[in-house]
Image (tube, rainbow, N blue to C red):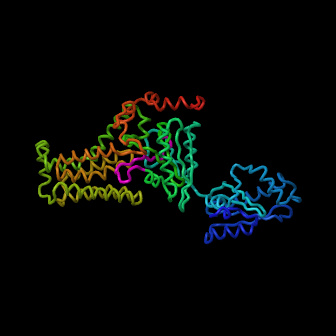
């Protein structure tokens, strides 16, 4: 569209014709003509989508405009269109929900966003009112995926404006910056990213802006689209950014120098960068006593290694290293495996396959049915497999423990990475035994140390080793120690005292 094409015409009929051409076959678009001035001889029309705007708001806008003319501009019996135009050009728009637009493409964009746009005959500008959006939004409730026993219970919603308000209410600091842009493509989705000036690393912020600029032109529907467009390694099984639906988690990330990304239409907040150790932390860790939070965090670490290595360790021990198993336990395992037609590798592979299938079915089915199918299905399949001599009881227990350990991860994305790495470790264990598991771990560690998240070392602060940042990794240090960390001290020295 050229510059001339974006100019608003002073001819009301021409503007209406252009709108009808642009929004042809849009049955929910309504053009509402009305009059004002002496004997209502001056013409105007409001244009809006009936699916985005309440009808009563249109009538309210019309009445407000008709009342404004005699009160602010002049007597209704003598007022002219020129005087109305001069009034708005000189005084602007008094309503906080209205803007004056002088480009046709901007007027079209406002209509698509749910504005009421008013065209006047003889004026090359339009009034655009943003009040009275009709779309019903989900109320602020506790996030289902991040429920807590102790702590705040508010979660983000699909309305980005409300989410920013939730964050502003918690972090009342002028250094909290929010920058917005509109994505390209057909969706024209509004995207915002925030950071805490003086706390965020300048090089990391510059790298983020460079990557986000290259991702602006696509159709962005969710924060997951941005995550994939700006991540360092698309094919890595490990997530390089965290997501949350909790305002308190987003605020704590900002205090640690992270960048958050929000997209209109989704309640998920993207946190950049995301380090490996942060995926074992939960918001509830900071609402319990230090000793309990540290114990739970160590338990999650143990669950990570259990979910990753239990199947491959069983295959390696029973196939290559039976001498490492206590005699009584070995005899019990051999008794349960007597008469089974499959080797340990295939047996574990089949049971994990059915377990993953049941888990996926439980997620996709309606909630009342899904939980029953996943629990009853697991019991029935496990019992039937044992009775049919397809799997041993030890394998069923092993697969169940592996699944339970993966459920202990506070972030679903890291649990998916564990599930993906189970198969190559099982293959290495079936071919090379314990030596194969060792090779697999070396490869995983090499990948973790090489991986970057927004240019930052993914395995930090373990490699490179940064002892001063280990206060909140394997264990959770007391809050006083965390508040006195280098980043927090820097933040407080650069923020106005009255804010804190």
In the image, residue 233 lies in the stretch drawn in magenta: yes
Looking at this view, name the residue that lies furthest to the bottom. Answer: 25
- Give the x, y percent position of residue 100: 71, 54
On the image, which quarter does residue 30 sit in? bottom right
In the image, residue 323 lies in the stretch drawn in magenta: no
Q: Depth check: 78 or 285 in front?
A: 78
* Residue at (31, 52) in percent of width and height: 419
Q: Main secondary structure of the magenta part?
A: loop
- Give the x, y percent position of residue 220: 50, 57
- Give the x, y percent position of residue 453: 40, 45
Q: Give the range drawn in magenta.
A: 231-249
* Residue at (50, 36) in percent of width and height: 199
Q: How many numbered marks have been drawn onto this rendered protein structure?
A: 0
Q: Look at the image and tell me in which quarter the C terminus lies.
A: top right
Q: Depth check: 160 or 236 in front?
A: 236
Looking at this view, name the residue that lies furthest to the right. Answer: 78
- Give the x, y percent position of residue 332: 13, 48
Q: Depth check: 427 or 343 in front?
A: 427
Q: Depth check: 108 or 134 in front?
A: 108
Question: Is residue 28 visible to the viewer in this orientation of the structure?
Answer: yes
* Residue at (84, 55) in percent of width and height: 70
Q: In this view, does 427 lie to the left or right of 172?
A: left
Q: In this view, does 81 lie to the left or right of 470?
A: right
Q: In this view, does 121 lie above or below 399?
A: below
Q: Is residue 395 left or right of residue 475?
A: left
Question: Is residue 249 visible to the viewer in this orientation of the structure?
Answer: no
């Amino acid at each position: 569209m050229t510059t001339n094409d974006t100019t608003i015409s002073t001819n009301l009929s021409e503007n209406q014709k252009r709108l009808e051409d642009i929004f042809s076959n849009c049955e929910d678009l309504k053009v509402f003509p009305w009059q004002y001035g002496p004997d209502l001889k001056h013409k105007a029309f409001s244009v809006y989508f009936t699916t985005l705007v309440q009808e009563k708001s249109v009538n309210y806008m019309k009445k407000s405009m008709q009342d404004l003319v005699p009160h602010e501009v002049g007597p209704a019996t003598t007022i002219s269109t020129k005087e109305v135009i001069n009034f708005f050009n000189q005084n602007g728009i008094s309503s906080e929900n209205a803007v004056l637009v002088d480009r046709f493409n901007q007027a079209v964009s406002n209509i698509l966003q749910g504005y009421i746009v008013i065209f006047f005959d003889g004026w090359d500008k339009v009034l655009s009112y943003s009040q009275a959006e009709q779309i019903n939004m989900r109320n602020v409730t506790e996030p289902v995926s991040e429920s807590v026993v102790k702590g705040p219970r508010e979660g983000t919603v699909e309305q980005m404006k409300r989410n920013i308000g939730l964050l502003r209410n918690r972090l009342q600091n002028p250094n909290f910056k929010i920058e917005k842009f509109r994505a390209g493509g057909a969706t024209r989705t509004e995207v915002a990213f925030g950071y805490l000036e003086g706390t965020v690393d300048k090089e990391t912020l510059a790298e983020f802006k460079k990557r986000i600029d290259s991702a602006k032109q696509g159709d962005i529907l969710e924060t997951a689209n941005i995550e994939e467009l700006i991540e360092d390694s698309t094919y890595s099984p490990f997530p390089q950014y965290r997501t949350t639906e909790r305002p308190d988690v987003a605020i704590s990330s900002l205090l640690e120098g992270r960048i958050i990304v929000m997209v209109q239409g989704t309640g998920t907040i993207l946190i950049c960068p995301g380090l490996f150790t942060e995926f074992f932390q939960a918001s509830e860790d900071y609402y319990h006593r230090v000793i309990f939070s540290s114990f739970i965090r160590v338990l999650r670490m143990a669950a990570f290694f259990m979910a990753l290595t239990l199947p491959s360790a069983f295959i390696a021990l029973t196939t290559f290293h039976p001498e490492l198993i206590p005699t009584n336990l070995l005899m019990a395992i051999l008794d349960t495996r007597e008469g089974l037609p499959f080797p340990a590798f295939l047996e574990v592979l089949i049971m994990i396959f059915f377990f993953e299938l049941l888990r996926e079915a439980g997620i996709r089915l309606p909630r009342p049915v899904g939980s029953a199918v996943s629990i009853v299905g697991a019991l029935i399949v496990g019992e039937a497999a044992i009775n049919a001599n397809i799997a041993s009881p030890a394998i069923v227990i092993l697969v169940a423990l592996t699944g339970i350990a993966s459920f202990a991860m506070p972030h679903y994305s890291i649990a998916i990475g564990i599930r993906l790495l189970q198969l190559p470790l099982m293959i290495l264990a079936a071919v090379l035994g314990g030596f194969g598991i060792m090779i697999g771990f070396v490869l995983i560690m090499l990948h973790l140390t090489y991986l970057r998240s927004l240019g930052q070392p993914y395995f930090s602060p373990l490699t490179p080793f940064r002892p001063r940042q280990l206060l909140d990794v394997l264990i959770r240090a007391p809050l006083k120690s965390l508040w006195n960390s280098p980043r927090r001290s820097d933040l407080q020295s650069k923020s106005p005292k009255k804010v804190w």
